[in-house]
Amino acid sequence: MVNSPVRVAVQRLLVRWFKEKASLPPGAKVLEVGCGRGAGAAMLLKEFAPATLHALDLDLTMIRQAKAYLPPGQNGIFLYVGDLLHLPYPNAALDAVFGFGVLHHVPDWRAGLAEITRVLKPGGRYFLEEFYPPLYQNFIARRIFLHPEENRFHRADLHQALEAAGFETQTIMEHSSVGILGVAVKEVAPRG
Ligand SMILES: C[S@@+](CC[C@H](N)C(=O)[O-])C[C@H]1O[C@@H](n2cnc3c(N)ncnc32)[C@H](O)[C@@H]1O
């Protein structure tokens, strides 16, 4: 499913929507978490032209596919095996993090969100496409896809967690039975 041409076409639309909604500063340092076979990373390079694009996935097979998928000689891109729960960056190091359908795969998704928040600069952006349990935990989807079963987030859980993490979220598209496409901006001054 993830590697299908349909997914690539959908992802192209998602990246264009993101670009319409938010720009990145010149010289932006960008990370894509859970990059899969690298189709999204190629689109991000083309559409946002960041100074550096790091793209990681937990799965070595995916990173091998991504290295083969991306044309050789792509400047500024670094693909590696990594875990979004342990991002190898100091605090406030990145201008943007992109996650296409990844956080709902993480058993401790709150810890994943905290890690994304940690590495973003104040004013940095988390571009997210995420899915809610009615879509992937229904009778049919359970037989096709593999997802964690416990501790899932629904619409209200995700919005509460984003707010608690200090994000202001602009929703591009959302349905409580499907998922969300949105841009969450990390607040500049901590509350208090
Ligand atoms: C549904 S796929 C999405 C792939 C790609 N982003 C796309 O949209 O086509 C989820 C991806 O997240 C990766 N993933 C799951 N847990 C992860 C984690 N903790 N850290 C990094 N990647 C993870 C999986 O290996 C998989 O490639």
Image (tube, rainbow, N blue to C red):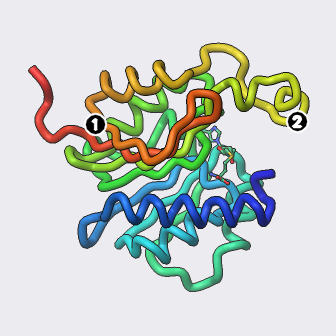
Residue drawn at x 62%, y 23% is 107
Judge whether 189 appears above or below 82 on screen. above
Residue drawn at x 44%, y 55% is 31
Q: Is mark 1 within 8 Å of ligand 1?
A: no
Of residue 141 and residue 166, the one placed in the foreground of this image is: 141
- Given the image, on which type of amino acid does mark 1 rest? Glu
Classify mark 1: residues with Cα within 10 Å, few (<14), some (14-19) or many (20+). Answer: some
Count of marks, rendered view: 2
**Is 119 on the left-hand or right-hand side of 127?**
left
Residue 88 can be seen in this image: no
Instruction: Return the x and y of residue 139 as percentages of the image width and height.
Output: 86, 23
State the residue position of label 1: 168
State the residue position of label 2: 144
Q: Assign a secondary structure to mark 1.
A: strand
Classify mark 2: residues with Cα within 10 Å, few (<14), some (14-19) or many (20+). Answer: few
Judge whether 107 appears above or below 127 on screen. above
Instruction: Return the x and y of residue 177 as percentages of the image width and height.
Output: 64, 28
Q: Assign a secondary structure to mark 2.
A: helix
**Is 7 on the left-hand or right-hand side of 143?**
left
Residue 89 can be seen in this image: yes
**Is 48 on the left-hand or right-hand side of 152?**
left
Of residue 171 and residue 158, the one placed in the foreground of this image is: 171
Instruction: Return the x and y of residue 176 as percentages of the image width and height.
Output: 57, 28
Instruction: Return the x and y of residue 114 as percentages of the image width and height.
Output: 39, 29
- Given the image, on which type of amino acid does mark 2 rest? Ile
**Is 156 on the left-hand or right-hand side of 38?**
left
Judge whether 182 appears above or below 166 on screen. below
Q: Quadrant of residue 13?
A: bottom right
The C terminus appears in which quarter of the rendering? top left
Outermost residue to the top: 150
CA gap, disc 2 to disc 1? 34 Å
